[in-house]
Amino acid sequence: MDVFEQFIGEVKMSRLPYIEVDELDPKDRDLLKLPLNLYRKLANSPDGARAFRSLGHHIRFTSTLNPRLREMAIIQVGYLAKSEYEYAHHVHMGLEEFGLSEDDIRAITSETKDQKSQLPNLDRVVLRAARDMFTNLKISDQNFKFLENELSHEHVVELVLAIAFYCAVVRVLATLEIDTEPDYRKVLKKFPLTEY
């Protein structure tokens, strides 16, 4: 084995570089106002990063869907994908910003394992809807009918968009091998991603 092969075997090579704000054209520096690793990798394509952030911004800031339900669905997708980055970030946000409790986070794990939880029916169906879309491409007729009876048509569409977007996000995170920042890794100690 030559020195190059030995070096490659010992060091994990990043698929693409993390971009620093001073590497960007001044017109694109707003992309790294929040310098998370996801944005730093996406900044390799400023126009792509901007388009990506546009739908993400709507889901998080302008959607009228109950943010607690949205975060539960996103955490469910992150859990199913075993996406440390998505799961850790959204568990943190759910607890700090969107009214989720530690019991809610544990209930997502229980529900994924087909174990009973104390969650209300709507929460449980939102989690099932996220599992449906992640695993079977679409929400089952039964779960969709329940959501249609409980939510407005607008909120059903907003939920579907949120789940679909984050099904895409976990694939971007995995393919670009985006590292979870140390502050968010702490979440994984308290709420580990376990087998289901």
Image (cartoon, grey):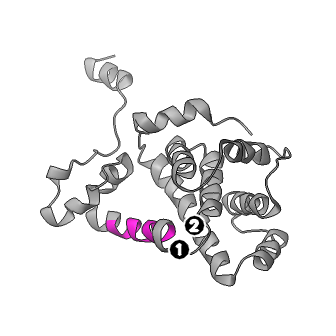
- Secondary structure mostly seen in the magenta stretch: helix
Residue 159 placement, left or right of 18 = right
Q: Which residue is drawn at 76% across and 47% down?
A: 112
Q: Quadrant of residue 177?
A: top left
Q: Is 105 rendered above or below residue 158? A: above
Which residue type does callout 2 highlight? Answer: Ala
Q: Is 24 rendered above or below residue 36? A: below
Mark 2: few/some/many CA within 10 Å (<14, 14-19, 20+): many
Spatial CA span between label 2 and label 1: 9 Å
Residue 22 in percent (x, y) is at 14, 51
Q: Is 76 rendered above or below residue 7? A: below
Mark 1: few/some/many CA within 10 Å (<14, 14-19, 20+): some
SS class of the residue under badge 1? loop
> Front-most of 7 and 157?
157
Identify the residue under disc 1. 63
Q: Quadrant of residue 157?
A: bottom right
Q: Residue at x 29, y 68 (%)?
A: 47
Which residue type does callout 1 highlight? Answer: Ser
SS class of the residue under badge 2? helix
Provide the residue span drawn in magenta.
50-59
Q: Which residue is drawn at 57% across and 59% down?
A: 167
Query: Circles 2 and 1: CB distance less than 8 Å?
Result: yes
Quadrant into which the C terminus falls: top right
> Front-most of 151 and 36?
151
